[in-house]
Amino acid sequence: MKKGLSKAFLSLFVLAFLLMGVTAAQATVNLNMYYPVAVGGPITKVIDDMIGDFEKANPDIKVKAVYAGNYDDTRVKALAALKANQPVQLSVLFSIDVFELIDQGVIVPFDEFATSAEDKKWLASFYPALMENSKAKGKIWGIPFQRSTIVMYHNKDAFKEVGLDPNKPPTTWKDMVAVAQKLTKKDASGNVTRWGLHIPSTGYAYWMFQALCIQNGEVLMNLDGNRTYFDKPAVVDALQFWRDLAVKHKVMPEGTIDWGTLRQKFLEGATAMMWHTTGNLTAVREGAKFDFGVSMLPASKRLGSPTGGGNFYIFKKATPEERKAALKLIKFMTEPELTAKWSIATGYTATRADAYETDVLKKYVSEFPAAAVARDQFKYAIAEFATHENARNKKFLDDAIQNVLTGGKSAKDALKGAQGQAERVLKAYR
Amino acid sequence: MKLQRQIAGPVYAWLLLLPAAVLMVAFTHYPIVGGFIASFFSTGREGRPSKFIGLENYSSMIADPVFWQVLQNNAIYALGVIPISVSLAIFMAVCVNGRLPGRGIVRAAYFTPTILPMIAVANIWLFFYTPQIGLLDQICGLFNIPSHSWLGDTKTALGCMMVLAVWKDAGFFMIFFLAALQGIPPELEEAALIEGAGRWYFFRRVTLPLLMPTMLFVLVNATINSFKLVDHIFILTKGGPDNASSLLLYYIYEVAFGFWDTAYASTLTVVLLVILCLAAITQFRYMEKRVHYQ
């Protein structure tokens, strides 16, 4: 009897064990994600390491993270994969693609499954300026991950050379022009060997332009993403100022300036100051053979920069289990400690205030104060340009900017044209 | 028995053709027909399904200034790149066909651009063209020519693309001409020499006509290349500034995968197809009269 009982127990035990094994095998969730890299440095390795740590901590979740090019390439790949019914559950995509992704019906708002008190606390932990691009229709669709603002890099050696205080970069447009004129150097025959300033105008021309507009006291779109304000006088003035930097003040070369090669030009001393994303900070730090500084962008009527960069999105096609696993992954990747590590490895701004309270980032900022500039600029930052059919409206604006910068139409005519085009597209969304 | 053979013959032939036919239909003909049909529908979106709109895509295409600009750019690009790269290819082929010392090295050097992937090439040229620190500006600096934003100027951006395309294509075409030149029997040259024909006369009256079949092949390829190779645009300019260096296929990519307006992209693709068909037909018709295969 006793023997039989223990036998029964044993077999029950074995059965339970087997069942556990089966359920454990079933519970392994596979996640696929795409992510972009838009800045210099060995970013893919950093991401792989973070994912590796996550898998170690969560053996029941397998993550395949695929580097997919720049922001546009990544959106194309993610959407193409979804349309072809390939399993993709989450991705890091451009924060400003939020309306496009909603209109295509591919993403789910986080409010639907991040419902616990702890989740809500987590959602509220990010900088409000960064969440502006995540919100639409009263819901939260994206979680800030690789985020940035635009900052001004300056070559301290060049400042010293012309007798400027290297620790006092210009803080207003007027100052900036005066300083840049001093920094512009010509050789005996009158050819420029070093420019005072470079603001890039390919790739993300609208982004740089948005900074100028914010500083000039105007925004380019409403937060519902169905109206643009390209033809407002302050916007026209901002574009005129950009053009004037080359033709009137002669501190910047004429024509467009390439986004991709600008960092190299700054490192080679071909320009003394440049506007660029904070995401390039670490790459500049590693490549610079001279002393350089980083500061907030200068003000015309106010200080300001748009935020920029990529958010985590979860796709509608993910099953409830996959959504849960994806949420776990995103929470892991945005923990203060990892956020700090990520910020140091790239230069991207830490997305939440408590990351700056961690020991690693505290130490880093005290050694390298430039790392905190973007954070301090958050006070003045607003959402990056995002509308319905964003790629199209962005192109209208980019084309107008490039047309003016290469000496085509007047700022007023070009922007009026772009406004008309955007208006036709956006009417359907009001 | 006879009937069996009558059936078996064609069936056998069709079976042999089947694999190729399946691939052609799946990846060439079906997409063409599908694209043509899609060009009469609107692009579907969440809450706004795709519907038949007749010729509306075509009328908005005619009203689209960017379309006309990329078409014009593409015409200039083709008319510049094709004659230059083909004549350069013939010139290079004639040069390395002779018995000059180290011609193996020269041939390899001419052919190198072809084996490099376009994306890699474009990344190299990006730094050639970069103002101030780029190779081109460094050379210009030696002659005291002021620095210029080659890719950032609407007047020079397209030209820069064309130079790159010529550099990349000429070596590839040279290989075909070189092979053709090797096939020309040396007796012809000896006979011409005895008759007292000059080098240029010999080239014009003997070599060139014998190169004609190759010429047709190369021209067709060059034309197709100038419409279908746009990889370098992604790296160098993204079509800018203000669409100055954008080509038709690049614009199609932008519309299809940037704007996700697949219907309009299909419409543009139909135009591209028509252009390529017309070019191929004209070339075959015209050249056929002047081409004689040996």
Image (cartoon, helix red, strand yellow):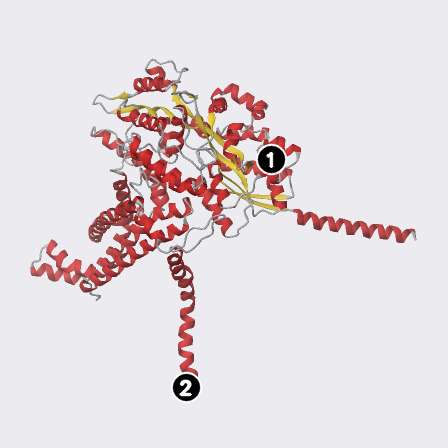
The part of the image, by quadrant, that contains residue A204 is top left
Task: Name the secondary structure under disc 1.
Answer: helix
Q: Residue at x 40, y 24 (%)?
A: A217
Q: Is residue A67 visible?
A: no
Kindly identify which chain the residue marked by label 2 belongs to.
B
| Mark 2 residue element | helix
Q: Where in the figure is residue B223, as x and y percent of width and height?
A: 27, 53
Coordinates of residue B96 in the picture (x, y in percent) = 22, 51
Residue indicated by mark 2: B2
Q: Is residue A10 above or below residue A425?
A: below
- Residue closest to the eye, A170 or B185: A170
Mark 2 neighbour class, 10 Å CA radius: few under 14, some 14 to 19, many 20 or more: few
What is the residue that sits farthest to the right in this orientation?
Answer: A1
In front of the other: B116 or A285: A285
Answer yes or no: are tags 2 and 1 on the same subunit: no
Q: Which of the image's four quarters has the C terminus of chain B? A: bottom left
Please say if B287 is above or below A76. below
- Point out which mark residue A331 bears: 1
Q: Residue furthest bottom?
A: B1
Type of the residue with mark 1: Lys
Give the answer, above or below, for where A297 lies relative to B231: above
| Residue at 60% over, 36% down | A53
- A56 left or right of A269 in image: right
Chain label for disc 1: A
